[in-house]
Image (tube, coloured by chain):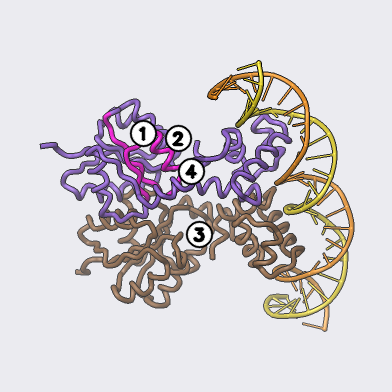
Chain colours: A purple, B brown, C yellow, D orange
Amino acid sequence: MTGTIRLLLADDQALVRGALAALLSLEPDLTVVAEVSRGDEVVPAALRSRPDVALLDVEMPGMDGVAAAAALRVALPDCRVLVVTTFGRPGYLRRAMEAGANGFVVKDTPARQLADAVRRVHAGLRVVDPTLAAETLATGPSPLTERETEVLRTARGGGTVAELAATLHLSEGTVRNHLSSAIGKTGARNRADAVRLAESHGWLLG
Amino acid sequence: MTGTIRLLLADDQALVRGALAALLSLEPDLTVVAEVSRGDEVVPAALRSRPDVALLDVEMPGMDGVAAAAALRVALPDCRVLVVTTFGRPGYLRRAMEAGANGFVVKDTPARQLADAVRRVHAGLRVVDPTLAAETLATGPSPLTERETEVLRTARGGGTVAELAATLHLSEGTVRNHLSSAIGKTGARNRADAVRLAESHGWLLG
DNA sequence: CCTTACGCCTGACAAATGTCACGGGCGGAG
DNA sequence: CTCCGCCCGTGACATTTGTCAGGCGTAAGG
């Protein structure tokens, strides 16, 4: 007899977190042993509560779910990780898998399937939305340079080139070159468009 | 004896919807009688299932939750409406109340309070996050003209002025004037910044 | 070793953007 | 009726943005 599967839930929205706890607690073989609202609380809570599976949201304050997954693999190698996210962005899936996640589920999936996904992950299987997997393969990895990504990430705030240059400690010309390159690589028409596209692909994590 | 409170759930994320159903079904006096994933399915489903309270998300395909709330007030005047949303945007709260919603809850609130919010709304009370209410009063209504709002909304896509003018059937100069005016009113530095700010205030609904 | 890619910078150019002043038409409030 | 605000448009202007061609240094791989 294997006993119950112990779960850790990480999601910044308390209502969703609580609701997921209620949903999963309906299953006799699942027990929620910890809930956290921030990415940087995942590892400490896990060390305390020793979960078998951690369900991590990607968008969280403190530390994103992908980074938390990586940290968790180091701190508790036996703990499986199932990433549960709002946005089915190819880059998220790729990064999550590279970080050692065992499964990736978007919040669009029917509620009934979540418990099964947890069990599969606990059993050592990988769980991935096939549609999203295909899209990820098709999209390929981010074509953006680290610097380009950083510039684009900073440009999300909506500042001028001068401001970007100031916060990044770069020349204005350099910023514009990185932006131009990013615009070209993403196929965007604008800086704003490039930000939009890169974000929708999940290339702006970090 | 009043019997159980019949609920309709509307949220585009199936997992969240199902989880909320599980959470609320734990309460003996609450019953989920309908679930929909689109705004334009709210009224038809409500006509079929006759709920006492409808929990509506704001961001939904087909029709946003605020519009659905307004439609619901016409179709089923006795049905109470509790808006449950991810984003605590002042404009959302304002618009929801104007549309006749009886309560407004953000998904940050603790899960335990949701059932109580439902009961309060069902009892005829208004439920509003006090912090968000204060912020809404402080922010005031949208200073943007209908046209300015529309231009800004179209500008979210990240197109050029020529494209905006084409889709809006306006002169390029007019588009730029509206944008300039919107930038001034929002205190933004950019068109992109104006879009960001207006959206964060909840001024771009529709 | 040589090539390649990246980061950083310069300078210059065309295009897009943001601002301003102005005018006409329309509808509502005083 | 007259004012006012909004909508639509024009034209002109300064600024910002996007693009291109180059140059220099460094690190990684053939």
Residue B40 percent across, percent down from the top left: 42, 70
Between the residue at mark 3 and the residue at mark 1, the CA separation in whole angstroms equals 39 Å
Residue A118 percent across, percent down from the top left: 26, 44
Mark 3: amino acid: Tyr
In what quadrant of the picture does the C terminus of chain B appear?
bottom right
Q: Are marks 4 and 1 in contact (CB under 8 Å)?
A: no
Which numbered disc, 4 or 1, marks the residue closer to the eye? 4
Q: Are marks 2 and 1 on the same chain?
A: yes
Q: Are marks 2 and 1 in contact (CB under 8 Å)?
A: no
**Comes first in the chain, label 4 or label 2:** 2
Q: Which residue is identified by label 4?
A: A140
Between the residue at mark 3 and the residue at mark 4, the CA separation in whole angstroms equals 37 Å
Q: Which residue is identified by label 3?
A: B92
Residue A50 percent across, percent down from the top left: 25, 31
Mark 2: amino acid: Gly
Q: Are marks 3 and 4 on the same chain?
A: no
Between the residue at mark 3 and the residue at mark 2, the CA separation in whole angstroms equals 27 Å
**Comes first in the chain, label 4 or label 1:** 1
Q: Are marks 3 and 2 on the same chain?
A: no
Which numbered disc, 3 or 4, marks the residue closer to the eye? 4
- Examine the rendered structure and indicate whether residue B17 appears above or below residue A118: below
Q: Secondary structure at mark 3?
A: helix
Dot 2 falls on which chain?
A: A
Q: Which residue is identified by label 1?
A: A100
Q: Which residues are magenta?
A: A78-106
